[in-house]
Image: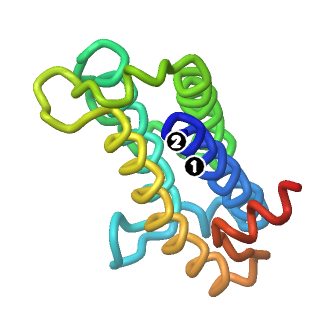
Amino acid sequence: MKLDLIKLYIEYHIDMTRRVWDSIGQITEEQFLADNIYSHGSIRNLMVHLTSVERRWLAGLKNGEDVPHLKQENYDSIAKAREIFEVISKDLGDYVINLAEEKLNQPIEKLSEPTWQILLHLVNHGTDHRAIVLHKLTELGAPTFEQDFILWLWNKK
């Protein structure tokens, strides 16, 4: 049961983040890169941060490796930033699909938290940053959506 729940939440997380990227595709490159005083700054910075954090946690979950954060300045367009998101989200999805139930309660190397807590953290972290980006997109006049989990479930049927 726990594994099915984790898989469902990760699927939701990836789908919602992909939908945010679809909305981001409706703004200009200048709007994407424009600085903002809240959180990590620009929409680009927030989205690269989100991808970078997932990449780091996933590396730790897979082999205990600590990889450096992605450099935001290397993603100077919507297309480049989305491309790295798609690579990491596929990797995350593949990891979870192949995850065994007994692995969920095992802590990752150098941390005491079990795998399932790290994966739920990724979902929660994503919800926070998607909400910030969706707010910014609304201000820019881009199409947005509600990211409620239950609405996603109802639409999934």
User: What residue is disc 2 on?
Assistant: 6
Q: Is residue 56 visible?
A: no
User: What residue is disc 1 on?
Assistant: 9
Residue visible at 26% across and 34% down in the picture: 114
Q: Locate residue 105, reporting x and y percent.
A: 31, 30
Query: Callout 2: 10 Å neighbours few (<14), some, many (20+)?
Result: many
The amino acid type, in three-letter code, at marker 2 is Ile
Q: Are marks 2 and 1 in contact (CB under 8 Å)?
A: yes
Q: Is residue 134 visible?
A: yes
Residue visible at 34% across and 64% down in the picture: 40
Residue visible at 63% across and 27% down in the picture: 90
Q: Is residue 37 above or below residue 13?
A: below
- Whole-angstrom CA distance, mark 2 to mark 1, is 5 Å
Q: Locate residue 109, reporting x and y percent.
A: 17, 20
Residue 107 left/right relative to 138: left
Query: Callout 1: 10 Å neighbours few (<14), some, many (20+)?
Result: some
Q: State which quarter of the image contains the N terminus.
A: top right
Q: Locate residue 2, reporting x and y percent.
A: 49, 40
SS class, disc 1 = helix
Q: Is residue 46 above or below residue 134?
A: above
Residue 95 left/right relative to 106: right
SS class, disc 2 = helix
- Between 35 and 19, the one lying in front of the other is 19
Q: Locate residue 93, reporting x and y percent.
A: 60, 30
The amino acid type, in three-letter code, at marker 1 is Tyr
- Between 11 and 26, the one lying in front of the other is 11
